[in-house]
Amino acid sequence: MQFTKAEEYGTLGVLYLAEKNSSSVTPLSEISEAMKIPEKFLAKIFQSLSKSGIVRSHRGVRGGFTLAKAPNTLTIKEILESIQGPYHLCKCIPDIDACPQGPECAFRNLVVIAEERLVTVFESHTLADLVKWQKEKVSTSE
């Protein structure tokens, strides 16, 4: 299992916003440069994040983005699903007909357990947790 670049970059971009002053508008170019993410790709990702209400877009000369929700209320699951849609480890999880073995498939049953645990982790951690961990990482490396 591997996250897509969109999921990784989107989460890093939102993390950057969360670390900034919540009232300041941050240009996409700043996020792109700071997180080493291609700006055009980040723009597409932030369109999805904006449509889903994760970030707020501000137009104009001093335009950019702010978080639309408080970091302690924004789960990692919300961020990931706003970028790629509902998260599934196998195609057969949401669609049993996609599994040639059907409901008796032992591998599918294992993947269902793994997915439930993974989703629980994503639901139980917020953007505020990532900000805290990032600050701890920075302070220990100094």
Image (cartoon, rainbow, N blue to C red):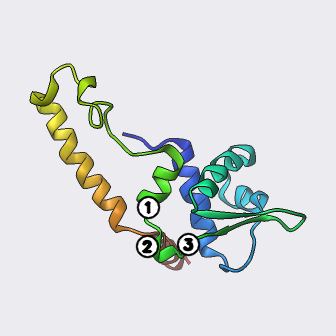
| Amino acid found under the numbered disc labelled 2 | Asp
**Of helix, strand and loop, which one carries label 3?**
loop
C-alpha distance separating marks 1 and 2: 9 Å
Left or right of 122 on screen, residue 108: left
Query: Would residue 18 appear left or right of 79 to someone viewing this image?
Result: right
Residue depicted at x 43% and y 73%: 129
Give the amino acid type for the residue marked by disc 3 in the picture.
Lys
Disc 1 residue type (three-letter): Ile
Q: Position of residue 100 (x, y in %)?
A: 20, 19
Residue located beneath label 2 in the image: 129
The numbered disc on residue 12 is none
Where residue 88 appears, as percent x and y from the top left, is 34, 41
Q: Which mark is residue 69?
A: 3
- Characterize the local packing of mark 1: few (<14), some (14-19) or many (20 or more) Cα atoms within 10 angstroms: many
Disc with the residue nearer the chain's start (3 vs 1): 3
Residue 54, percent across and down?
57, 62
Q: Are marks 3 and 2 in contact (CB under 8 Å)?
A: no
Q: Is residue 132 visible?
A: no
Classify residue 105 by image quadrant: top left
Residue 72 % position (x, y): 46, 76
Mark 3 to mark 2 CA distance (whole Å):
14 Å
Residue 132 vs 39, above or below: the answer is below
Q: Is label 2 in a helix, a strand or a loop?
A: helix
Can you identify the residue that label 1 sits on?
76
Comparing labels 3 and 2, the label whose residue is closer to the camera = 3
- Label 1 with label 2: CB-CB less than 8 Å: yes
21 or 139: nearer the viewer: 21
